[in-house]
Image (cartoon, grey):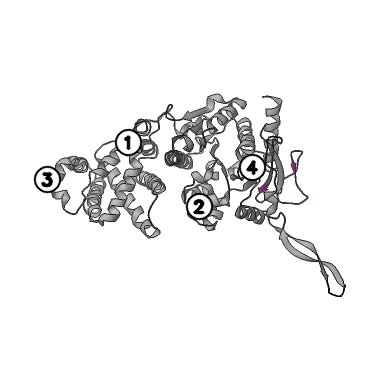
Amino acid sequence: MTKKELDLFKTVVLLLSAVDPLFMGTLFTGLCVISGPGGGKTSCVGKSLAVGMLCKAHELGGLILTAKAEETENWKRYFKMAGRENDLIIFNARNGLFDPIWYEWNHGGKSIEGIVELISTLASLAKQEGTNHEGPFWIRGVELLVRCSVTILDLGEMPVTLANIDRVIRSLPTYVGEADEKAWQSSSFCYELIERIRNRKDSLTEDQWSDLEEATKGLFEKWPSFDERPRSSLEMTWSGMASRFMFSPYNRIFCSGQCTFTPEMTMFDHKFVLIDWPMLAVGQATGQFINVCLKLIFQRAWLRRNLAESPNPVLLWQDEFQYFVVPKFDNFFAETCRGSRVATVVMTQNILAISEALGESTPGSKTKSLLGNFATKIFLQQNETDTNQYAADLIGKEWKYIENFSGGDRGGSTAGAGLQLVHILRPEEFARLTPPSAENPLAESICHLSGKIPNASHTSERPEGAPYLRVFFSRE
């Protein structure tokens, strides 16, 4: 490691050891970096944290999401600086296979409800249209389709894959009574599958037979009885999500029934998986969907692991977090992942980007609840006023004597001071933080560490007793 790299490493270790001598303890409580454009979020703080974590915690594995094309090359450099090139798995169109449905079915205990939850979450992210009052019906409709389809695939001894689920859904009756028509029966994959199961009735348990009856009722009676317009919307939403994986190269990569890497490799073998599907390169919708799909798989695997068998810590890294937010599940994950030894680092432009991803027009309870799960927050130069107000409120207020002066028409004047409750750092202070530039490689930041008052060091500044740390991160 060069002297410059060593100094970078010392900076981040000193910052985090000021809060937690075990270093990783800070990340287990969540770390959020918020910066305006050019503030140094990725080039300064991101680089410092990445190199520091890789060097300090060699037992660490994890998942890295990417939004920007240059991130892959950046991470290759970080792993080389840490001497961990062999621990990085890069997943892209040229390297790797990962069938999410196959993995979840075979590694998640063959849980039908696990598949239903995964697909309904992914489908909700893919759905771009629809009003709020359609929500409950739409969610129940997707769950009905997936639950019944997976049930008959399992009972019919067919592989539970996205392609087979799609075959079942595309072969369903479209109106009440069509399931009794010979023409439909002769061409329907769904009907063929159910007849195959019925022919082996004697080998089914009582519970399996009951499941078959419920699935048949759902697909042959409930589904065709839906009003045509919302049913068509459900079909189009499903088709829009599934069809992206039915064409090359996605069918080969995501529907192969194979996984060349798994979340278990991050838990047992200290591997990092980098999802090299940046949105600027493959399109926002596709890149976002692939990143979030893999993220959900890894999150679920990490939460259900047995720590007695794999106690190694893992990391979820999300730069441009606003593109990867999963409403409801991310909050649940952030609240519970510490117990599964999962460290989280998220970075975003401002809190408005998070609120928009959560469906709020302005930062409300959902936004603040999610951000509240990240105990350490690093604020850099910012020109978005809601974010600066949030940061100032987070740092808190204190009683100060504020001078006042008044003068009269006849020349008399009075001066004094009174106690007022004011911000420790006013909102405009965050707009004045120094960003990096061609002449200045340092990004000035304000670090807030929930529940702790950090110790200042030669790399940072803190007014006595203040609940924040002023830290300078270098991009060099």
- The amino acid sitting under disc 3 is Lys
Q: Which residue is mark 3?
A: 182
Rendering quarter of residue 160: top left
Element type at mark 4 = loop
Mark sitting earlier along the chain (1/3): 3
Q: Which residue is mark 1?
A: 246
Describe residue 186's horizontal placement relative to residue 309 as left or right: left
Q: Amino acid at mark 4?
A: Gly
- Of marks 1 and 4, which one's residue comes earlier in the chain? 4
Decide which of tag 1 and tag 2 comes sooner along the chain. 1
Question: Which badge, 2 or 4, is on the more N-terminal residue?
Answer: 4
Residue closer to the observer: 210 or 301: 301
Q: Amino acid at mark 1?
A: Met
In space, the residues marked 3 and 4 are separated at their CA atoms by 66 Å
Q: Which residues are magenta?
A: 447-466
Q: Quadrant of residue 243?
A: top left
Task: Please state if 334 lies on the left or on the right of 411 as rendered.
Answer: left
Q: CA distance from mark 1 to mark 4?
A: 41 Å
Residue closer to the observer: 152 or 283: 283
In space, the residues marked 2 and 4 are separated at their CA atoms by 21 Å
Relative to 158, residue 148 above or below: below
- Most frequent secondary structure within the magenta stretch: loop
**Residue at the left extreme of this rendering:** 182
